[in-house]
Image (spheres, grey):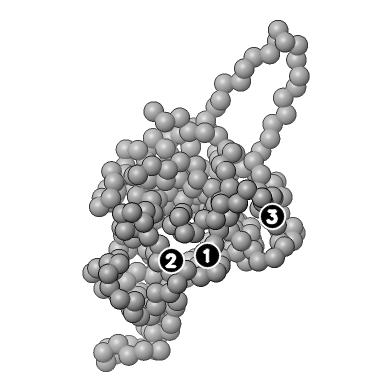
């Protein structure tokens, strides 16, 4: 799926399609005072199970989940639905025929965040884009809860010092990992610090909701800031005389680090869904 400090712009006055992201409301019938019972908050089992698993799996910077841990998290995420985070496909935001005023801006909400991991949801209106960006030193699980989107991802051909902030910006060769359209419900995708498509972009074909688990989360203080890239075809630059057929060249590209694109700005909203129990 995007650093919160740079990518998310908090706004108190919601505009455009932001007002259409709402959480499910349940009507409570009025009763006489003696009959009123305080409701006991119920956390969806899948969301609580995901949180507990994340606390066990993510051990902080410099660590990568074990294969068995990855499998368990994917199992939990694969079974998650919109309702587990307090959403419904009947909400106005997810209606294909609802027009979007102005530039389609992506919306972001945080379910939970600590130093070791974060749980968040991205809401992409139709044609909304999260441009090509990286996840330095991070393992990220992405679950498409609703919608249809195009995902394109790369990994560095030479991952050595790939996230070194002191290296000058230059065009670097990357291998194409994914270039496909995904429709919910689809299997959870996983990217790793140097593999799995660590550099990726999302383009919504229909309104989408994506649940992301990031471990560890972005942090400018810990040199895990987000970098953005511009793609160039493989044939645009020389590769030291390395011979490659036209078909093979389609699987590679040159990535040039760029300043934060205008369409990477996001609007942050408060998470109003079921609250997890931190145990």
| Residue 161, percent from left and from top | 24, 68
- Observer-nearest of 174 and 111: 111
Residue 79 in view = no
Upstream in the sequence, badge 3 or badge 2? Answer: 3
Check the image and report above or below for 33 versus 119.
Answer: above
Are the residues tagged 1 and 2 within 8 Å (C-beta)?
yes
Q: What residue sits right under mark 2 in the picture? A: 133
Check the image and report above or below for 3 versus 158.
Answer: above
| Residue 51, percent from left and from top | 42, 37
Sort mark 1 into few (<14), some (14-19) or many (20+) by Cα contacts within 10 Å. some
| Residue 99, percent from left and from top | 74, 61
Name which residue lies at 40% across and 89% down: 236
Name which residue lies at 57% across and 43% down: 270
Mark 3: secondary structure: loop
- Observer-nearest of 102 and 39: 102
Are the residues tagged 3 and 2 within 8 Å (C-beta)?
no
**Label 1, label 2: how far apart the Cα atoms are:** 9 Å
Q: What residue sits right under mark 1 in the picture? A: 264
Quarter of the figure with the C terminus:
top left
Q: What residue sits right under mark 3 in the picture? A: 15
Residue 57 found in image quarter: top left
- Viewer-nearest of labels 1 and 2? 1
- Observer-nearest of 149 and 200: 200
Mark 2: secondary structure: strand
Residue 199 found in image quarter: bottom left
Name which residue lies at 68% across and 13% down: 36
Question: Seen in the image, is 37 located left or right of residue 74?
Answer: right
């Amino acid at each position: 799926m995007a650093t919160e400090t740079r990518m998310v712009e908090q706004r108190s006055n919601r505009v455009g399609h932001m007002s259409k992201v709402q959480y499910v409301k349940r009507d409570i019938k009025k009763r006489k005072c003696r009959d009123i019972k305080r409701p006991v908050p119920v956390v969806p089992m899948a969301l609580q199970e995901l949180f507990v698993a994340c606390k066990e799996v993510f051990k902080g910077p410099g660590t990568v989940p074990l294969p068995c841990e990855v499998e368990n998290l994917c199992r939990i995420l694969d079974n998650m639905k919109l309702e587990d985070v307090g959403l419904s496909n009947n909400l106005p935001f997810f209606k294909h025929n609802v027009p979007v005023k102005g530039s389609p801006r992506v919306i972001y909400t945080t379910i939970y965040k600590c130093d070791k991991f974060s749980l968040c949801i991205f809401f992409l209106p139709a044609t909304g884009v999260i441009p090509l960006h990286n996840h330095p030193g991070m393992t990220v699980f992405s679950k498409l809860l609703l919608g249809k989107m195009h995902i394109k991802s790369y990994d560095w051909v030479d991952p050595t010092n790939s996230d070194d902030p002191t290296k000058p910006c230059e065009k670097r060769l990357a291998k194409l990992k994914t270039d496909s359209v995904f429709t919910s419900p689809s299997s959870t995708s996983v990217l790793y610090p140097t593999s799995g498509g660590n550099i990726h972009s999302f383009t919504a074909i229909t309104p989408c909701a994506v649940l992301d688990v990031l471990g560890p989360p972005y942090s400018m203080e810990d040199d895990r800031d987000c970098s953005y890239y511009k793609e160039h075809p493989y044939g645009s630059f020389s590769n030291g005389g390395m011979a490659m057929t036209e078909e093979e060249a389609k699987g590679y590209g040159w990535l040039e680090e760029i300043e934060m694109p205008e369409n990477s700005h996001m609007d942050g909203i408060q998470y109003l869904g079921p609250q997890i129990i931190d145990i």
